Amino acid sequence: MALQALQSSGVTFRKILSHFPEELSLAFVYGSGVYRQAGPSSDQKNAMLDFVFTVDDPVAWHSKNLKKNWRHYSFLKVLGPKMITSIQNNYGAGVYYNSLIMCDGRLIKYGVISTNILIEDLLNWNNLYIAGRLQKPVKIISMNEDVTLRSALDRNLKSAVTTAFLMLPESFSEEDLFIEIAGLSYSGDFRMVVGEDKTKVLNIVKPNIAHFRELYGSILQENPQVVYKSQQGRLEIDKSPEGQFTQLMTLPKSLQQQIHHIMDSPGKNRDVEETLFQVAHDPDCGDVVRLGLSAIVRPSSIRQSTKGIFTAASQEEGTQGDSPGHAWMPILQQRWRKSLCGPREARRGTCFSLSSSWSAGQTTRLPCGFYEIEPILLYVNYMESSFLMSQTK
């Protein structure tokens, strides 16, 4: 499997992993703390380490992790493992992050995702969030023998190659290909507009060409639609309508559906295959594919980033002041107080008592509005609408 070429037995990563419950189907670490990046993230020694833990039973895993690492969680911990799992699965991109954690002398963040949700994302690109991360070099620390998961990991890499082909010319370099692949999950990502370094994709790819080649080399060698001249670092692909139609028909389901939604004229009611046939003959085929990617990435990135405000805020560790969520919390609390409480309770800042589902019998006084998780969705929709309006100006 191509992904296994990047497995690591790094002692540092395994020591950190030992602080968490063991029931993991996949654990990997990524980012500038693992692979050198150009630009402002080049300080590899002091960079944050980003982990993702894939678990079969999120409720059981969070239950054990709350006992071991209670202080890693934000105020949401008082709602218990079932509610944390519900927030993880049903809001954002299906992943729950604990951020700004000091562990064995390193600053880390870690995301938890259900194995089933990850497999769906790898195969269908429902969110292209963790699936997008796994299209770039990562260091695998632990992986079980789940055949379905391993197959989905391979499928995700092949889909990334096919999608990039559709957006590239007939002849191009390895670097061109890897830049397209690395940029798939940033297409439409609102963070690239409001926060991230605009050269982030280049900074990821340029110092890591060898790692990308190791990840994708065998897939390119085996792909019948490409002539891969590995010695020269050049590739040639079939850009005929027939060739592009073949590629479009193998794209992940969510991307096909988004392309169909963009291109299907009102009243025609064509099926997806007819729409993809039309796109294959369109000289702007690559632009249409890029629009389809943006339609997947944009909403999931907004919702996941907004969810991060709640999962990372109010950390009990000393590093919480660095979290961007903290600047937003007073605004959110004020917004919630106006909409959920009476004027007296809003001025006081607390308006109810919650019997914690985690520690039976304890009553926890929470900031006003925190008992109601639904306002997260309202604020997410507000954020998404504001972003879309800014893009159309």
Image (spheres, rainbow, N blue to C red):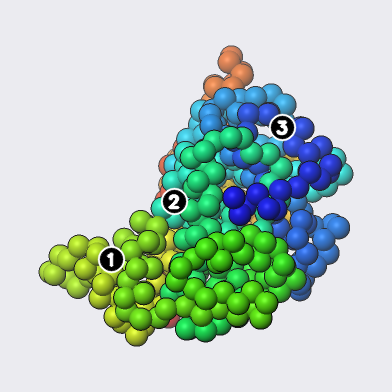
Q: Residue furthest left?
A: 267
75 or 286, which is in the foreground? 286
> Is label 3 in contact with label 1 (beta carbons under 8 Å)?
no
Looking at the image, residue 314 lies above or below residue 37? above
User: Callout 2, which amino acid?
Assistant: Leu
Q: Which of the two discs, 1 and 2, labels the residue nearer the N terminus? A: 2
Give me the C-alpha separation between circle 1 and circle 2: 20 Å
Query: Is residue 157 or residue 314 the one in the foreground?
Result: 157
**Helix or strand or loop: what does disc 2 sit on?**
helix
In what quadrant of the picture does the C terminus appear? bottom left
As helix, strand or loop, the secondary structure at mark 3 comes to: loop
For the question of whether residue 6 can be seen, the reply is yes
Residue at x-position 25% and y-position 63%: 272
Measuring from the top left, give residue 233's x and y in whole percent: 65, 78
Which residue is painted at 66% across and 81% down in the image? 232
Q: Report the residue marked by disc 3.
A: 20
10 Å neighbourhood of mark 1: few (<14), some, or many (≥20)? some
Which residue carries the number 1 mark?
261
How far is the residue under mark 3 from the one under mark 2? 28 Å
Indicate whether 144 appears above or below 208.
above
Q: Residues within 10 Å of mark 3 (few under 14, many from 20)?
A: some
Residue 192: x, y in percent? 58, 70
Left or right: residue 258 compared with residue 89: left
Q: Which residue is mark 2?
A: 123
